[in-house]
Image: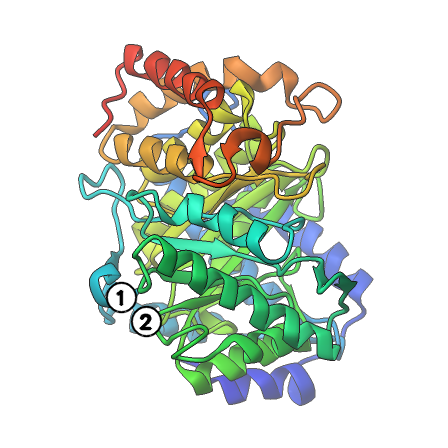
Amino acid sequence: MVNFNEVADRAINSGPLLKLQKFDYKMFEVTSRLVKEYSIKYDPKKPIPSDDDLADRLFEAGVKLYAEMGTYCLDTERVIQFSEEEIRNSLFELSMMPDEIDIGDGTEKRSLYKRKIADPRKPLIVGGVVEDSPIEGRDFVQLYKSIAQERIIDGIYYGPPPKKIEGKKWALGSPLDCIAAKSAVGWMREALRSVGRPGLHLLDACPSALGTISVCDPVNGLRKTDAITLPTISELKVNFELLNKVAYTLHYGCLRSPFWTSIVGGFGGGPEGCAIINVASALNAIMVYQVAGAGYIMNSSILQNPPVNTARQTIWVRNISMQALVRNTNLICGGGGLTSAGPGTEQQLWEIAALGIHTSCVGGHIFHGARKSVLVKDNQGTGMEPRWEGETARAAASISREEANELINFILSKYEDNISSDKAPKGYSFNELYDYENVTVKNEYYDLYRKVRNELEEKGLIFD
C-alpha cells in the first residue's frame, strides 16, 4: 500500500497541478472513451444485470480510469496520482488481508464479512436515518431509540448533529461544532443504553474533522470498533477536511467508511460512465482513504434531479459496480439510499425495498440506512425504515440475479412514475408515525408496512 504520508505529500507538494475545470472535462473525456473501449452498456430492462463478463470489464475500466485521473485535491489544485502498478499492488495486498472485521462491543459485537453474489450468509444492517433535520435533546434520543430497539439492527448510522445546540445554530469549524458533535454522540449513547444495547456499533457522520476529533472517546464517544464516514466529493475529489479525518482516525485507530454518489448526468455522463466512476471511487477509498483492513465502503449513485438513489438508472449503476467490486476485490461492500417519498407512505416502503433487495443480492450489506432525499420536516425518520430495509435485504440475500431483476422491475412499477419531487408524497415526522413516549409504531404505519410486505411475499420473497 502507498502509505498515507505519501498520499498527503502528493496532495500538498508533489502531485501535478491542474485546474478544476480541466479535471472535470478530462473526467468526461476519459470516461466516455472507456465506456466504448470496454463495451459497457446499460440495459434498462435489466436493472440487475447477470453478466459476469460485463462486471469484470467494468472493473478493468475503473482501474484504467483511476490510473489516468487520480483524486483531485480541491485545496491545492493538485492531483493525487497513482500508477496502475501501485493500484494493482494495493489490490493484491488487500486480497491477502482478512475478509472480515469486528464492529461493536460486548454482546453487540458483530463480525462484518465480505459477502459474495447470492451469498446465503445474511447481510449486516447498519441502519439509521441519514439526517439533516433532527431536533436536539430528547427528540433526538427518542428517534434513535426507535432504531436501536429493532433487533435486526447491527449498527446505527447517525449525523450530522442537530442544526441547533441549546437553541443556537452552529457553524463548521467553530467551537459550537465541537459541542454539537459531542452532544450528538452523547445522545446516541443514551439511546443505546435505554434499550439495553450499549455496545452497538456506531457510524458517525460529523461533516468536519473537528467534529470527528471531538467524538472519538472510548468511554463516552466513538470507540475503536466504531466508524466514521468519509464522503468522496463528486467526482473523485477530496479536500483537507476529509484528509484530516483520515489522518486522525489512523492515529486514533477507529474504522473508516468511505462512500460516494456518482451523478448520472454529471461529469461521468450516463449510467455507464457513472458505473466506471463507482469502481474508481472504490480505488480512491483504498488508496487515499486507507480503508483496506480497517473499514467498509458504501457504494452509490444519484440522479441530478430528483436527487435519489432509487431510480432505474441508479439501481443499475450501484448493482453492476457492486458486482464488479465483489468479484474483483476483497472490499466489504454495502449501500444505503435516498428515496423520493417520505416516511409513512407506501411509495417510500417500495423504494426502500428496492434498495435492500438490489444491494443484498449481489453481496452487499446495508450501510447508512435510508431516508427521503429532501427532508421537509424536523425528525423526519423512524425505526421502521431501517427495519424494513434490513428485512428486505436479508430476505434477498441468496436469490439469483435473475430473480432479483424480476422483483426489482415489479417494485419499480409501483413508484417509477411518481419519483419526481412534485409527485412523490412528502411523508410524516417521527411524532406523527410513532407514539412519542412509548416509542412504538402507530397502527396506520404498521398496517401499511404489512401490506407491502404481504405483496412481496406473494411475489415469492421469503422473510425470516
The reply, left or right, for residue 123 in relation to residue 220 is left
Can see residue 251? yes
At label 2, the amino acid type is: Gly
At which x and y percent is residue 198? 33, 63
Q: Which colour scheme appears in the figure?
A: rainbow
Q: Determine the image quadrant of residue 78.
A: bottom right
Q: Secondary structure at mark 2?
A: loop
Q: Determine the image quadrant of residue 24.
A: bottom right
**Up/down of 29 relative to 7, above or below:** above
Question: Which one is in front, 344 or 118?
Answer: 344
Can see residue 284? no
Among numbered discs 2 and 1, the one appearing first in the sequence: 1
Q: Residues within 10 Å of mark 2 (few under 14, many from 20)?
A: many
Q: Which mark is residue 101?
A: 1
Q: Which mark is residue 293?
A: 2
Q: Mark 2 near mark 1, Cβ–Cβ under 8 Å?
A: yes
At which x and y percent is residue 397? 26, 36
Which quadrant of the rendered structure holds the N terminus? bottom left
Q: Determine the image quadrant of residue 250.
A: bottom left
Q: Which mark is residue 329?
A: none
**Up/down of 175 relative to 412, above or below:** below
At label 1, the amino acid type is: Ile
Residue at x-position 30% and y-position 60%: 330
Q: CA distance from mark 2 to mark 1?
A: 7 Å
